[in-house]
Amino acid sequence: MKRLAIIGSGDLALQIAHHAIFDNHYSVVGCFDDYKEEGDFNKNLLILGKLDMIESCYKNDVFDVLIIGIGYNHMDFRNQLFTRYKNIIPFGTIIHSSCQIDKSTMIGSGSIIYPGCNFDMNVEIGENCLIYNGCIIAHDSKIATNSILSPGVNLAGFCFIGENTNFGIGTIISDNVTIVNNVRTGAGAVVVKSISVSGLYVGIPAKKVK
Ligand SMILES: CC(C)(COP(=O)(O)OP(=O)(O)OC[C@H]1O[C@@H](n2cnc3c(N)ncnc32)[C@H](O)[C@@H]1OP(=O)(O)O)[C@@H](O)C(=O)NCCC(=O)NCCS
């Protein structure tokens, strides 16, 4: 079994470690965090060092694959980290065994698919995405790199979602909708038309508020 190291040591990192271990994807050797001391623990997650130790630990055979455990409050930092390491260190991917994923679906490295997701024919999920519990993505819809879908997001067919997306819990995207990079939605937003301007959208139908 390959050995996983996680960037970040907070709640998201603990969730990733939990699914990696208990759903039999990876053993977990620990995590990197600039705000913690090497050798400390968060619960059972060992701090391997600060982020500047990632490359040396990989070269010293401490771990085999990396996953970013930094959440939606730091979208740019997630992106920077993935861009920095993706050509140097292999990224892991976790697709929880409870998901129903059509064989034609493509899922990029570094992405995590939480329990209970359902992806239909020709769905594509980019690299370094977090797709939380129970998201449904219908046929032929695509989500670009470094995007986060909160629990219970539903996408209809033929949707094209840009990079650095952060959809709030229960967001619904109607069919044939295209959304530019850097769009956030509030909880329960319903997007019925394509979005061509980045920003925060809330409500039904979703309107730009920031
Ligand atoms: C939209 C959101 C990002 C705004 O957060 P915020 O910037 O802190 O804004 P506030 O909570 O101060 O709300 C500002 C206004 O928008 C309204 N509002 C907030 N969230 C809303 C939503 N989802 N739909 C409609 N209106 C919303 C508030 O009622 C408030 O209205 P008011 O100014 O008339 O009182 C946040 O409310 C939200 O929905 N986050 C998603 C959370 C989520 O999905 N978490 C899952 C993590 S896995």
Image (cartoon, helix red, strand yellow):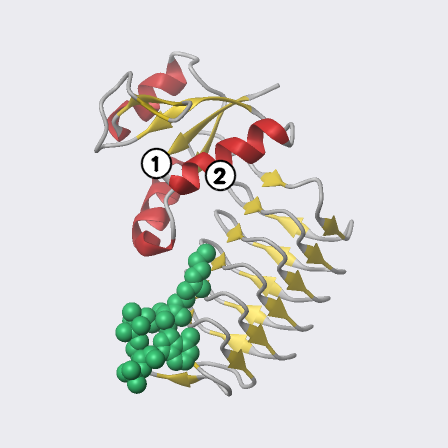
* Count of all numbered marks drawn on residues in the image: 2
Classed neighbour count for the residue bearing mark 1: other residues with Cα under 10 Å, few (<14), some (14–19), many (≥20): many
Residue 113 x, y percent position in the rendering: 59, 47
Mark 2 CB within 8 Å of ligand 1: no
Element assignment for label 2? helix
**For marks 1 and 2 on the same chain, the one whose residue lies earlier in the sequence:** 1
Tell me the residue that label 2 is attached to.
Answer: 15
Residue drawn where x is 65% and y is 27% of the image: 24
Disc 1 and disc 2 in contact, CB within 8 angstroms: no
Asked if the residue at label 1 sits under 8 Å from ligand 1, the reply is no
Residue 141 appears at what percent x and percent y? 65, 66
Name the quarter showing ligand 1. bottom left
Q: Amino acid at mark 1?
A: Gly
Q: Which mark is residue 8?
A: 1
- Where is 88 relative to 122, above or below? above
Question: Does residue 94 sit above or below 187 in this rendering?
Answer: above
Of the 4 image quadrants, the one containing the N terminus is top right
Q: Is residue 197 visible?
A: no
